[in-house]
Structures are given as structure tokens and as C-alpha cells.
Image (tube, rainbow, N blue to C red):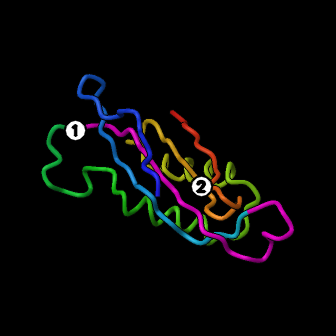
Amino acid sequence: MSRIEVPRIASAARGLRHVFIRNLELLAHIGVYRHEEGRMQPVRINVDLATQDIADARDMLENVVDYAVIEKRIRAIIAEGHVKLAETLAERIATACFEDDRVRTVRVRVEKLHALTGAESVGIEIERSR
């Protein structure tokens, strides 16, 4: 598995913290080609969130963006059924991340792991801001 280089997101000067999910591998109904219809294939998802920073979260989960909530939203999107494009899946994930008002910027990377013979993965990366 290759290492993804992520530009720095956290910034005290800009009041941002970096919440992320790395290399979440799931089975998804995805693809535009006939041989992809009706079968699941592995995808790898990476999410980077620039979120509102607070100096003291008081050690309370409700004071921060919960990556477990983001993961559940990703799983729910995949469970909705077939999607043709990795781009569509990435946009849906980005939209779900913005359900938390503290999220300022979302970067989503969706990789299909068995799409091309000889390639570790193919995919798309998007970044969206409020």
C-alpha cells in the first residue's frame, strides 16, 4: 500500500485542526463497465478535514468532529447501492462531511483497487470548501 503525502492542513494561525481517515477499505458497487455491474469491488477511501479548531475541547467528544461519525456516513453512502463514477462517490462523501458545521474544507480520495491490471489503484481526489 502506498503512502499518501498530504499537504499540511492544521494551522494555529488560521484556527484549523486536521481530522482524517486513512486507507479505509470497503467493498462497493461501483463502475461504468458491464463487467463491474452486479459485483462488488474494493475501494480505498481517504478523507482529510480542515475543521474549526478550539484550544480546549475539555476532553469531550461532542466538542470535536468525530471521525467515527464520518466513517459511518461513508459506509451508509456505499450501502445505498451502485454508483457509476468514483467522482460521484467522492462528491457524496464530501457532502456528508459538511453535515458537521465545524468542517471548513474536505479532501476526499477514492481509489478502485482492482480496476487496472498492474496498477495498485486508480481513482480521484477532490477538495471542497464552504
Viewer-nearest of discs 1 and 2:
2
Residue 93, image x and y in percent?
Answer: 56, 53
The disc label shown at residue 54, or none: 1
Q: Is residue 41 magenta?
A: yes
Q: Secondary structure at mark 1?
A: loop
Name the residue nearer the viewer: 82 or 23: 23
Q: Which residues are magenta?
A: 31-53
How far across and down, in percent of the image, does residue 48 sit? Answer: 43, 45
Query: Which residue does the numbered mark 2 point to in the structure image?
Result: 111
Residue at 59% over, 55% down: 111
Q: How many neighbours does mark 2 have within 10 angstroms: few (below 14), some (14-19), or many (20 or more)?
A: many
Q: Residues within 10 Å of mark 1 (few under 14, many from 20)?
A: few
Query: Which residue is at the front of the view, 60 or 23?
Result: 23
Most extreme residue toward the front, as rendered? Answer: 118
From the viewer's side, name the closer residue of 19 and 61: 19
Whole-number angstrom distance, CA of label 1 to CA of label 2:
32 Å
